[in-house]
Image: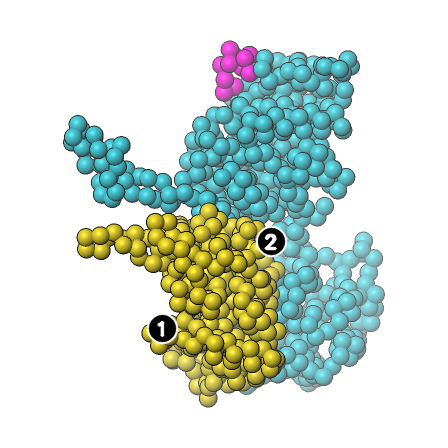
Chain colours: A yellow, B cyan
Amino acid sequence: MLDFLSEEKVSKFIIDGIKEYRQKYPAEEALNSRIVRPRYPYYGHEVWEEAASAVLSGANLLLTGPKATGKNVLAENLAYVFGRPVWNISFHINIDASYLIGTDTFDGEKVVFRPGPVYQCARCGGFGVLDEINMAKNEALVVLHEILDYRHTIDIPGYDSIKVNPATRFIATMNYGYAGTRELNEALTSRFVVISMPQISMENLQKLLQHTFPSLKKKWIQQFALLFDDLRRKAEASEVSERAVDLRGLMDAIRLMQNGLSAGEALNMGITNKSFDPYERNLIRDVIKARIPQNLENQYFFE
Amino acid sequence: MKKYLYTAEQRQALNIVWNAAGRYDYNPPFVAYNPHGVPEFYLNFVVGLSDKWFDTEKLFDFFESYAGTAHQKVFDNITWLALENSLYEKELPHRPALKIMRENHALGFFREESTMSRQEWMAKNNLLYSLLSERWASVLGRKGPVLSPREKGLAKRLKAGGGLSTDGILDLMRAILKDYFLFSRFKGLPNALKFHFKGKLADLLARFASAEIVRTDTLEIRSSQGKPGGSSSGRNFSKRRKSESKNEMEACFGRSLYSPTEQAVLEHSLCTDGDSGRHLWFARGVPDSRSAKTPDAKAIAVNAEKQYQKNRSYYAAYSGRNSSTIRHLKAQITGALSQHAEPVPIASRSGRLSAGRVWRGTVLHSSCVFERRMTEPQPDFSVLLLLDASASRLESQEVIASQAYMISESLRLCRIPVEVDAFRSLRGFTVFQILKSYREGNSLGVFRYFSSGWNRDGLALKAAGVRLKASGTGSRILLVLTDASPNDAEPVSPYGNRPLPLDYSGSAGIEETAREIKALRSKNVQASAIFLGEDSEAKNAEKIYSGNFVRIHRSDEISKAVGRLLKDNISSLY
């Protein structure tokens, strides 16, 4: 993965820093199952440099940006590059302190503490990915304050206060203005350094498609990338909703095509049918039709 | 102000054009439909490509240069034939799917041909049809129709190459029109002499080809068929204001919702200060024209019935797009609600034992002594949508009725109690018409909206306070659709340090209205406005609603604006 960073032209200084970090904090063998090679690499050397520098300097990261900007992909990539176990915590409206830190439970004859993901991550020096952090109520997030700031401790009422492992980092993601999200309070925001994630560039998208689908013909890699761009423009012009701008869906569709489904059916399943509005579906179908022939079989697209 | 509204099909056609052009601010001179009125995918795509590859301004000028001549339709179509070939060759290297799109279009052309009747065949027996047939046959590698040497020559010249620049292709077209149609007068004719392709003639001409590229002048749709002063009694009605007779109001707007005693109490408490001496009339709406008792009442009833039909037809004409708007607005509101949904304990037969309900088990032998926590949004607030129904809204009655219906339906579907009321002032009365009450299970009553008279916004807001109380919910949201220009024929009555009456317009009207908004807010009503007025009146909206308003430039943006306002209002309720 460090070679990949060199290919992405990440500065040697930062790559050396990552190597040093890995030597300083070798991963425990018991946690190897949590060190997962990411399915997709993150392309974009500027963001790589910003994010890696932040992690090296001990900061927690907040990745903000619209859909399909690779927030979670970057978080997974960072954890893997730094060789740390990952705890993925998906935030939602009903998340509370006990879910994050831990709660009491009954074990045989006595009440015991059952640690939550944030507690485990902080103790083991993992990378905690706080996904869609602004979905939770601000009251629930107060427990994170002392973990994230200079105190680096977790004080559990009725139990001990533990010191956070120095290898621990928290990477939060959020999509501002997404349905169901709220304003993040200032106290929490100030405990992160923020990267505003850019839209994936055409060049990087083509690289990603090429990496994921090596047998996809070059001219179709370009057309799928352009299709994604067409859909993004349509959503930006408010002609269709953001549902259509679905990079995961596009990748899934190509995978379905690889497994023998026709392009039309695969793209319907991956993208078009994610809109439940018949009028919008027509518009999306028109965009797809203008880039990808619908009835052709997979040998037309793949080598 | 021109208002551009599109049906779902028109919008779809434009989207295809925009997609090909790569920009969404392009206003195409043409869009294409097949004979069934469905957007023609490939031809619209070609229209969009023309903006991508050619100088649009020069193309526009060329189309304008023969606009209004007897052969305009034919010239348009053969110009597009030439453009199609050139654009195909330019775009193909960048878009492999274009070949299949073109072949599918050609197949569609011949499929349509095979379903034509003898009469349609006869109507299509002309040069343009032969050229189209030859083009699409060659695309499919089939044998084309038999052409005369002259037609063959023309067909060949129309296969313009991909290497041509804008000037190159326009020079080619000028030469073709000159050589084959003896046409060289490329300046356009004065408007008065132009031969317009509209109505039935346009329909006849549309039969020339199986898929037709048509000029987009039909896309501009007037927001209202009503002419100022034409569709309802308008201001003339209110000028004749000598008699402030309640009987007259009852004849024109139906029975009051309140008994005479309640009415007197309401007027006593609301028609005070600047509104003293004025009256209020709360009614369900205009009675049937057959039962109208006075000529005025009959005139109003007849116009209201006509407007009701226009409102319904207007909504039906855009029903596909309107349903889509309702779905989007509903999703927006549900999203805003779910952000604030608190888990609510619900009595249940299983779950966590509820100490407060245990007695029911022993005393009532009820098993419902447990509770479960549900997070389903249960809104404890209501929305009152208040529509300015003064004569200043004559131009956009159908649009307002449609938009109000969509807002009302979206809220109703989210189980939020909603009432839609319209207000207007006539003969010293501020008539408050309840179009849809909180309890009604549908919003069809909103289509009874019509505009007439003046708007005494201050008194209408006081009346709105009464209706807001009727909702019975914990919190209340008031949305006012307004031009922020209060204007009534009856003056502001002298009160306080004002010894003389003032005209209910300009700063006096604004002051009165702003005061009532403040009063409502002090009673915990979330009051905000959708401002539909001119630039000069934006300051008034700022003064009255202290920034809590959304400005829209087109009436068809109302529902989007309401989505934003509701989201903000719902957030501030919690």
Residue B362: percent from the left, percent from the top? 16, 30
In the displayed orientation, state which residue is furthest to the bottom. Answer: A303
Q: Quadrant of residue A257?
A: bottom left
Query: Within 10 angstroms of label 2, few (less than 14), some, or many (20 or more) residues?
Result: some
- Could you tell me what secondary structure mostly forms the magenta stretch? helix
B101 sits left or right of B356 in the view: right
Q: Residue at x 41, y 80 (%)?
A: A258
Residue A227: percent from the left, percent from the top? 55, 72
Q: Residue at x 41, y 43 (%)?
A: B342
Identified by mark 2, the residue type is Tyr
- The span picked out in magenta is B256-267
Chain containing the residue with disc 1: A
Badge 1 is on which residue? A31
Q: Secondary structure at mark 2?
A: loop
Residue B216: percent from the left, percent from the top? 67, 59
Whether B6 is drawn above or below A166: the answer is: above
Task: Tell me, yes or no, if residue B3 can be seen here.
Answer: yes
In the image, residue B464 lies in the stretch drawn in magenta:
no
B87 sits left or right of A48 in the view: right
In the image, residue B266 lies in the stretch drawn in magenta:
yes
Badge 2 is on which residue? B6
Q: Between residue B211 and residue B125, name the one nearer to us.
A: B211
B388 sits left or right of A41 in the view: right
Residue B298: percent from the left, percent from the top? 58, 24
Q: Residue at x 58, y 62 (%)?
A: A194
